[in-house]
Image (cartoon, rainbow, N blue to C red):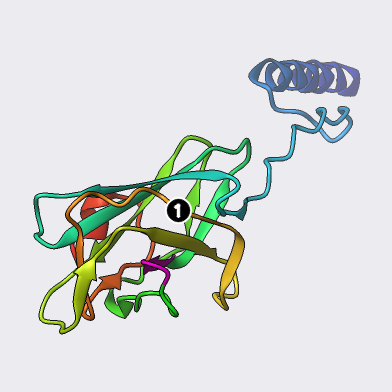
Amino acid sequence: MNIRRTRIATAAATALVGALALTGLTTGAATAAPATAKAASPVTCTGANTRVEVSQVSRPINHLLVKTTNTGKVPCSAYGAPLLGFNDPQAALPILRDSIPQAVVTLEPGQSAYAGVRTSGDGGHGRWGTKLSLGFQGRDLAGSVGPMVSPAVPKGTWVDDSATVTYWQTTAADALFW
């Protein structure tokens, strides 16, 4: 009688192992599957691995939209906010602190991040914006990393002392919300 139970148990165990193998599950005795390729770690977005465009928007008034697109082959992280200045300034525009996103914006190749620029409001001294300098912040947010870029400024851009820029956002709507 014990031999019969042993044969039944052995047959059941063999059937179970076969079924598990067919479903892709493995037993401890099976060999490990080959390792998959490790995903590329993000690098910092800079002027060297992105393309930057600046455009006027109809709403809200007195705003520009900055769009940066990852042109590299690996993901890049857009930390903080763009460091912007019009007409060779001594300092970058103030960053609108209320616009901080919940997470760093990381761009896969071909994806874009956006920042809104309020060019004028109730500020005093104004000037026509004819030249724009843009730098990217590093992970420590302690200044510019990588090469600066000089995207074209839309014609008729008036900039005064109340100008500000938002943090990088994942959508144009979020960037222009502020």
Under mark 1, the amino acid is Ser
Instruction: List x then y, in percent, for residue 85.
Output: 39, 68
Instruction: List x then y, in percent, for residue 131.
Output: 36, 58
Compared across the picture, whether 151 is left or right of 60 comes to right
Indicate the quadrant where residue 1 lies: top right
Give the quadrant of the C terminus: bottom left
Q: Residue at x 24, y 74 (%)?
A: 163
Q: Is residue 158 magenta?
A: no
90 w.r.t. 6: above or below: below
Which residue position is annotated with label 1?
Answer: 150
Nearest the camera: 33 or 94? 94
Magenta span: 83-88
Instruction: List x then y, in percent, for residue 25.
Output: 70, 27
Secondary element under disc 1, as helix, strand or loop, is loop
Compared across the picture, whether 148 is left or right of 94 comes to right
Nearest the camera: 6 or 92? 92
Instruction: List x then y, in percent, for residue 151.
Output: 40, 49
Tally of marks? 1
Residue at the bottom extreme, as displayed: 124
Query: Magenta span: helix, strand or loop, mainly?
Result: strand
Compared across the picture, whether 76 is left or right of 127 comes to right
